[in-house]
Amino acid sequence: MAKRTNYKPLDERLWKFLRQGLAYLETSGKPVPTTYVHPGGYAYGPLGLTNIAVQDVQRFFAEPERLTLKDIIKQPAIYEDYARKYADILLNHYLGGAGIDYTQLSPTQIFDILQRMWFLGPTGYQQGKKIPLSRQKKAQEWMMKPTPEQIRISRKKAIQSVIKQGITNPKQLYDILNYDEQGNKIGDITFEEIMEELKEKAKEFLATFLR
């Protein structure tokens, strides 16, 4: 792809969020193989990759190997690479070409635009065509879910709230955060997350002490 001065590749965290949403729409999030054929016979795999998408990727990224869609769906790693690159093209070339900087939008706004372009194709989207109501309702369901960043912040706050009670033993923190009084598992916060917050707390204490 000829990189424009405002070209902004998808970062890993955003793509993970977008990919999960696309998979939810295309296959209800079910773990289907990349060779899975969608009704209609022109889209394949968990993300509904099409021949048009493959051609766009090969045109914009000047892929050295002219693989066909049927070649690509047999190789999951290449399938995933093509899907991400196609999302990159839609957001940077087509949306960016219309003067919209996707990085200034929220993750859910980006997803809503991307899923429309993914289904309609860039031309259909630019022409103002509509996606089926059933798909839009499903997209709304996905967008109501918390984003990965919101989940991360919520988990951090949960750990911090217990630390503020004066509890700093990692095992004790783990048990309080993940088990109720009856010993039933209610959470999945990891020791790694707990240790990260304890390190941050120690840094804050040291900075205060050295003032």
Image (tube, rainbow, N blue to C red):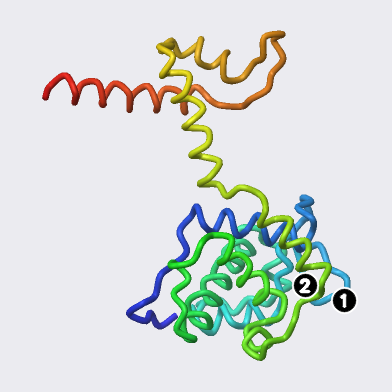
Q: Is residue 116 left or right of residue 177?
A: right
Dot 2 lies on which element?
strand
Determine whether label 1 and label 2 are within 8 Å by CB: yes
Q: Where on the picture, by quarter, is residue 87?
A: bottom right
Q: Residue at x 62, y 84 (%)?
A: 122
According to the image, label 2 marks what residue?
Answer: 43
Q: Mark 1 highlights which residue?
A: 40
Image quadrant assignment for residue 177: top right
In the rendered image, residue 187, in percent from the top left (x then y), is placed at: 63, 25
210 on left or right of 92? left
In space, the residues marked 1 and 2 are separated at their CA atoms by 8 Å
Residue 19 or residue 60, whichever sits in front: 19
Give above or below for 17 relative to 136: above
Dot 1, crowdedness within 10 Å: few (<14), some or many (≥20)? few
The outermost residue toward the right is: 39
Residue nearest the observer in this picture, 1 or 150: 150
Relative placement, left or right, of 183 versus 161 is: right
Circle 2 residues within 10 Å: few <14, some 14–19, many ≥20:
many
Closer-to-camera residue (39/13): 13
Q: Quadrant of the C terminus?
A: top left
Task: Look at 57% across and 13% down and name the residue there.
Answer: 175
Q: Secondary structure at mark 1?
A: loop
Q: Position of residue 161 (x, y in %)?
A: 47, 23
- Residue 114 horizontal/vertical position (percent): 61, 71
Instruction: Specify the farthest residue to the left.
Output: 211
Residue for point 48% across, 19% down = 162
Residue 117, x across and y down, in percent: 65, 77
Q: Is residue 186 above or below residue 4?
A: above
Residue 65, placed above or below residue 33: below
**Disc number at residue 95?**
none
Residue type at mark 2: give it: Ala
